[in-house]
Image (spheres, rainbow, N blue to C red):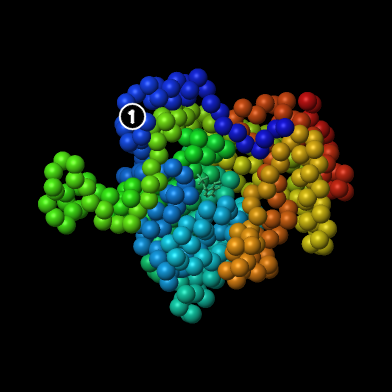
Amino acid sequence: MIPYGRQDINEEDISAVVEVLKSDYLTQGPKVPEFERAIASFCHAKYSFATNSATSALHIACLALGVKQGDSVWTSPISFVASSNCALYCGATVDFIDIDINTGNICINALAMKLDQAQSNGSLPKVIICVHLAGQSCDMETIKDLTKKYNIAIIEDASHAIGASYMQKPVGCGQFSDITVFSFHPVKIVTSAEGGMALTNCPKLAKQIRLFRSHGITTDPGEMNQESHGPWYYQQIELGYNYRMTELQAALGLSQLQRLSSFIEQRNTLAKYYDNALKGSSLTPLIPNKTNLSAYHLYIVLLPSIACKQEQKVIHKNIVCELRARSIFAQIHYIPIHLQPYYQNLGFNEGSFPNAENYYSRTLSIPLYPKLSKKEQNYIINTLLDVVEKKGFKPVPTKLGA
Ligand SMILES: Cc1ncc(COP(=O)(O)O)c(C=O)c1O
């Protein structure tokens, strides 16, 4: 089976982890701060905090921004559930902004309309979490312009987008947001097995993120309400969590980071090959913004839209199943969050975000990872076109050699 994504581990990665295993520190040693400094420097951000997942980074990002009961947080319905669960963890309510079906990212017009409405009925959000789907940045400058008069904080869920750039600057630089979050899950661009990172340029947010990551505990005498009892002393000044990354994870992440640029290059080359091969077919890849660099965490194509919704769902399912039967593990990113039973129980209904639902009935992620061979890629393209053609859609005129 050809997976839709997979990690790329080399001998240096293995040695880096083994070296830590032989060292004095498995956790809370020098590798985590080294990893943090390396990412901050790569992204041109002032502060960065490694966590045990992007989910926990998103949670403490919300906490640091003061998200609490009575607040509302908006995000994209086309994301992994972690993008919205983080707000629920804080006791806030969640709402969604429908997507632009061409990019899969939040739709700027839908956001503008929703903000206008929310202003008139007093339901503006405290935070908007922008998800850079598949590695392509949202239009952050416009989002910042639309939200700044309302003083809404912005988190970039850049779980898919380390190594991407927006307006010639690395995603994570924080020019248009308060906090950016990366994921280092194995299918992502670089991995630390499990892991995440929260980046910010704001010293106040940095202080809060650091506290929430580790039990709300400080060893800084300047943050304590009484004189230190001695060199062992710490104080708990917030209700935090153990969301720390281990030294093993940081060593793997650091080693992987050496190859970030080449991973991005390889992913872009593979994506371009798919783009060319699928040109003129009935499949529509998500449209990249030519002036920005996508990290291409995923390669997503949309099936043609057909009038009958039920038929669309059946065709979509059959295509995914047939691809899997033919050893291509096509995946769906994502089931709209508002259609999950947990969210339906919170009051969301089918029909609330029509673009997201239309997208869901047509989307396919086909394999994309640095080690994908030309032979495998040709097999994927030919099989995909064959399967799609059988459903009565238009194939490309010539097929590729294996
Ligand atoms: C957009 C998005 N946000 C958040 C997460 C959560 O990442 P992690 O698995 O590192 O907690 C994921 C993971 O797939 C994701 O795709």
Q: Is residue 359 left or right of residue 243?
A: right
- The residue closer to the viewer here, 111 or 316, is 316
Please report the residue visible at 67 percent of the width from the left and 26 percent of the height from the top.
373
Q: Is residue 301 left or right of residue 91?
A: right
- The quadrant of the image that shows the N terminus is top right
Residue 34 visible in the snapshot: no
Q: Is residue 250 left or right of residue 386?
A: left
Please report the residue visible at 80 percent of the width from the left and 35 percent of the height from the top.
326
Identify the secondary structure beneath mark 1.
Answer: loop
Label 1 CB less than 8 angstroms from ligand 1? no
List x then y, in percent, for residue 74.
Answer: 50, 64
Q: Is residue 134 left or right of residue 310?
A: left
List x then y, in percent, for residue 82.
Answer: 52, 53
118 w.r.t. 377: above or below? below
List x then y, in percent, for residue 325.
Answer: 80, 38
List x then y, in percent, for residue 26.
Answer: 37, 31
Q: How many marks?
A: 1
Residue 193 visible in the snapshot: yes
Please report the residue visible at 52 percent of the width from the left and 29 percent of the height from the top.
262
Within-10-Å neighbours for mark 1: few <14, some 14–19, many 20+: some
187 w.r.t. 178: above or below? above
Say what amino acid the circle numbered 1 marks: Tyr
- The residue closer to the viewer here, 359 or 113, is 359
- The quadrant of the image that shows the C terminus is top right
Please report the residue visible at 59 percent of the width from the left and 64 percent of the height from the top.
343
Q: Which residue reaches farthest bottom?
A: 121
Check disc 1 and report the residue beneath it.
Answer: 25
